[in-house]
Image: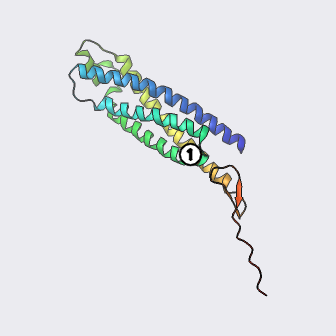
Amino acid sequence: MAERSGTLKSGLWAIRFFQFIFAVVLVGILSWFHHRLSKAGYFRFDSVDVPLGFSVAALVISAVATATHLFFHDDSQTLIALFDFLIFVGYFASCIVYRHNFNANCGENLLVRVFRTIGSQHCNMVRLAAALLVLQTILFFLSTILSHRLSRRRQAIDSTAGVHEEKSRFGFGRRSRRQPEVAAAV
C-alpha cells in the first residue's frame, strides 16, 4: 500500500510540474495578447483575461500544492483537491470563453482577426494558447482525482489505529485517549 501511495505522490508531482510550466507559458502568452488587444483599441478582453486570471491562480495553487507535499500534513490534501477542482472549473470556463479561437483555419479565429488590424497575425500563438488551455483543464482534472484519492487513502490508513488510539495532531506519533481507571466501589 505504501508503494502505491508513493506512485500516486510521484505522479502528482509530475502533474504539478507540468501544471506550473504550462501556467507560466499561458501567463506570458495571454498577457502579451492583452497588451496587443489594448494596443489595437479592442475593448473586449474577456476571451483573454479569464484564462489569464485562472493561469495566475494555477501558478499559485501549483506552488502551494507542491509545498504541501513537502512540508505540511497529509490531511491538507483534501483542501488542495478542492482548490484543484476550483481551478479545473475555472479552466473549463476559460475554454468556453476562448471557444471562438479553437478553429483550425486561422482566418476564423477571433483573436487572429483582431491582430490582423494592427498588421500581425500570430496564428500559432493563438493555437498554442488554445492547446495549453485544454491541457491545463485535463491536468487539473487529473490532479483533482489524484489528490482526492491520496487524501482518502491517508484517512483510511489513519483509521486503522486501535480503538483507544488516535493520530496526533501533526502526525508525529500516536497518543492514547483512554479514560482513567475508576476504582471499583466496594
Give how far across and how far down residue 150 sits, in percent.
Answer: 61, 45
- What residue would you read off at disc 1? 77
Q: Secondary structure at mark 1?
A: helix
Residue at the top extreme, as displayed: 119
Front residue of 82/139: it is 82
| Nearer the observer, 123 or 82 | 82
Image quadrant where residue 14 sits: top right
Figure check: 168 above or below 89: below
In the picture, measured across the screen, residue 179 lies left or right of residue 136, that is right
Q: Residue at x 22, y 16 (%)?
A: 117
| Within-10-Å neighbours for mark 1: few <14, some 14–19, many 20+ | many
Seen as rendered, the residue at the extreme right is 186
Residue lying at 71% horizontally and 40% vertically, measured from the top left: 3
Q: Name the quarter where the N terminus is drawn.
A: top right
In the foreground, 45 or 180: 180
Q: Which quadrant would residue 25 be assigned to in this image?
A: top left
Asked which colour scheme the image uses, the reply is: rainbow
Using the image, determine if residue 99 lies above or below residue 75: above
